[in-house]
Image: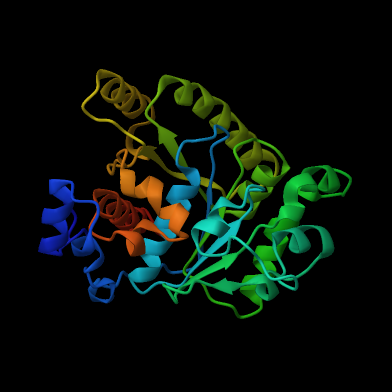
Amino acid sequence: MSKHRLTDVDMVEQADSGTDNGASSRAVNIRTFATLPAPKKTRVIAVANQKGGVGKTTTVVNLAAALALRGLKVLVIDADQQGNASSSLGFRNLADNQLSLYEVMTEGAALRDALLQNAKIPNLWLVPASMNMAGIELELNERTNFQQILGEAVQQLLSSGAHFDYIFIDSPPSLGIMTVNALVAAQEVLVPLQAEYLALEGLTQLTKTIDMLVIRLNPHLRFTGILPTMVTSNTLLGKGVLEEVRAYYGDIVMETVIPRNVALAEAPSHEESILTYQPASKGAKCYLDAAYELVNREEKP
């Protein structure tokens, strides 16, 4: 285990024993977490998979929370019309005058003017989705250079003096306009992969799309990792899928595996990340490990 991984003895013991609820899990002091080194420049990471229900938004929210709790400044851009990242971070209902990604994409509003700060994790910020995004792809399809709108907005944000160590873009479960915008805006792509064979078929299509975008629109985009999610490791199916994906994709597949975990499923209903909802749960431990591994996968100059 990496030296950056979980070191809180009580947390490890509770996580390994499967204790996911009760006062003991909430008693862990999140302020005692060790800090992580900041990247040399802002890492913009699109989290993408055109298959729904693979833990994509769960991955965005909890990786962002883990890094922010470790002293890094993190921004989540909710580019999914369903707005699940927004509600999971405490912004299920937006104020009438609150700007969202819709205004950024369709009206030229600045990302900086749409920022919201998470109440429980001060280092964590959000550009929310709104109900107006339901038909956004039809609106954007009529624009020229519609694939680059989000990328230009991100660059404008960074050049305005706003500093973030990590920017995560939660893309919708499709290969449509918003996902393309996320992949063009990003420098890296992280793919949550559910341990099922149908998910493997979708991964092949996604990698082809990424290869095409690298050639045509974003030559700087790199495949940072595939994160196995919703894994039931004690089944032959789970083991078989993991073995197959590791054999084919090699080191691109992350060592950390995210298991099926009740607390991970419950946290969004409380509008929290797993790191604040049940920080002693096995799900929290695994996402912390995934965050450390992601830090170690920074591209070296």
Location of residue 255 (image quadrant): top left
Asked whether the viewer can see residue 215, the reply is yes
Q: Position of residue 101 (x, y in %)?
A: 70, 60
At 29% from the left edge and 49% from the top edge, which residue is drawn?
Answer: 283
In the image, taking residue 70 as reference, residue 55 lies left or right, namely right
Q: How is the image coloured?
A: rainbow
Q: Position of residue 251 (x, y in %)?
A: 33, 38
Which of the 4 image quarters holds residue 247? top left
User: Which quarter of the figure has residue 298?
Assistant: bottom left
Evaluate whether residue 299 shows in this view.
no
Vertical comparison of 277 with 189: above or below: below
Where residue 76 sits in the image (x, y, percent)?
54, 61
- Residue at left 13%, top 47%? 17
The quadrant of the rendering that contains the C terminus is bottom left
Q: Is residue 222 above or below residue 234?
A: below
The residue lying at 47 percent from left, 60 percent from top is 271
Q: Is residue 67 above or below residue 179?
A: below
Residue furthest to the front:
22
| Residue 224 locus on image (x, y percent) | 44, 46
Front residue of 113 and 215: 113
Q: How many numbered marks have been drawn onto this rendered protein structure?
A: 0
Check the image and report above or below for 292 versus 214.
below
Q: Nearer the viewer, residue 80 or 74?
A: 80
Residue drawn where x is 27% and y is 50% of the image: 286
Looking at the image, residue 107 sits to the left or right of residue 266; the answer is: right
